[in-house]
């Protein structure tokens, strides 16, 4: 039996011009995970990064910790299939359309634009993102130029298939990715609906991990949203 561990990247720079960069707290979250794995003698035979800077940086921090401790760490490969779903593209393309159709959406979008920043602005952004993506997943809006939710889930399925094909027998594989691919992989194991899969994307903490067992045709969920290494309330973030 092999184990696939999917890690959500540390906190990125949400609502900043360069989102795809770990925040100082995100770097701490990654180091905490590396320390936890070293302390508990966890190792991996295969390491994979999603294509984003936040994925690569999270993995690189932990790889550096292992090597500094004299522990082996596999040379990572990058798989595009473990990229996040196109959330920002969905927001930019479809929020104006939905705001024109629905008064409540228009008012929410205007309130977000007026917000000065801080937790209130982040909360408003989350609410808008959840509403727009739900309508997108339900098929109310869409565009041939933007990857659909169904296509995203299929992309992640292909990525998991590639991992299973390249992993040696009875090996441990780690993939540094985002919350969307973690949820889409869980969908494969539990046969979730598309909407339930979307709802699951909001759950994983930054720096948390999920574990799947696979052998032959078997692919099953062992754990989800694990964060024993994030042992202080200040380390527990979603965005």
Image: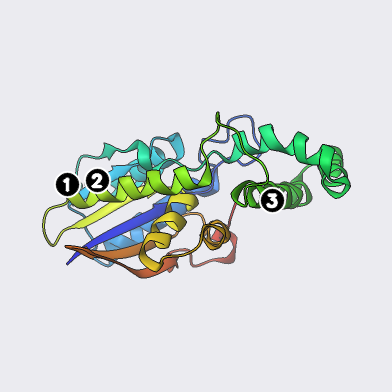
Examine the image and state in which quarter residue 186 appears: bottom left
In this figure, which residue is indicated by the disc labeled 3?
Answer: 126
Q: Earlier in the sequence, mark 3 or mark 1?
A: 3
Q: Is residue 78 left or right of residue 217?
A: right
Question: Which residue is depicted at the point 40% across and 47% down?
Answer: 154
Examine the image and state in which quarter residue 19 appears: top right
User: How far across and how far down the image is residue 194, in percent?
Assistant: 52, 57
Could one spot residue 161 in this view of the protein?
Answer: yes
In this figure, which residue is indicated by the disc labeled 2?
Answer: 162
Query: Helix or strand or loop: what does disc 3 sit on?
Result: helix
Rounded to the nearest angstrom, the CA distance separating label 3 from label 2 is 32 Å
16 or 84, nearer to the observer = 84
Query: Helix or strand or loop: what does disc 1 sit on?
Result: helix
Which coloring applies here?
rainbow
User: How far across and how far down the image is residue 135, in percent?
Assistant: 67, 49
170 or 65, nearer to the observer = 170
Picture quarter with the N terminus: bottom left
In this figure, which residue is indicated by the disc labeled 1?
Answer: 166
User: How far across and how far down the image is residue 171, in percent?
Assistant: 16, 58
Q: Is residue 88 left or right of residue 197?
A: right
- 3 and 1 marks in contact (CB < 8 Å): no
Rounded to the nearest angstrom, the CA distance separating label 3 from label 1 is 37 Å
User: How far across and how far down the image is residue 203, in percent?
Assistant: 55, 62
Q: Is residue 96 left or right of residue 159?
A: right
- 2 and 1 marks in contact (CB < 8 Å): yes
| Residue 7: numbered disc | none
């Amino acid at each position: 039996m092999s184990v696939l561990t999917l890690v959500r990247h540390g906190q990125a720079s949400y609502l900043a011009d360069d989102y795809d960069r770990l925040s100082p707290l995100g770097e701490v979250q990654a180091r905490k995970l590396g320390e936890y794995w070293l302390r508990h003698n966890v190792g991996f035979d295969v390491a994979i990064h999603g294509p984003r800077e936040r994925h690569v940086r999270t993995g690189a921090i932990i790889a550096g910790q292992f090597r500094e401790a004299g522990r082996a760490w596999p040379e990572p490969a990058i798989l595009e299939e473990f990229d996040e779903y196109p959330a920002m593209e969905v927001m930019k393309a479809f929020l104006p359309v939905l705001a024109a159709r629905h008064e409540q959406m228009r008012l929410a979008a205007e309130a977000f634009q007026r917000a000065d920043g801080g937790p209130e602005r982040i909360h408003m952004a989350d609410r808008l993102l959840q509403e727009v993506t739900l309508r997108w997943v339900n098929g109310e809006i869409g565009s041939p130029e933007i990857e659909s939710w169904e296509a995203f889930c299929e992309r992640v399925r292909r990525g998991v298939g590639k991992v299973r094909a390249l992993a040696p027998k009875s090996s441990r594989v780690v993939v540094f990715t985002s919350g969307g691919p973690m949820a889409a992989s869980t969908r494969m194991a539990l046969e979730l609906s598309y909407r339930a899969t979307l709802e699951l994307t909001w759950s994983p903490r930054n720096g948390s991990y999920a574990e799947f067992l696979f052998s032959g045709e078997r692919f099953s969920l062992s754990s989800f949203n694990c964060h024993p290494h994030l042992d202080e309330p200040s380390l527990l973030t979603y965005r």
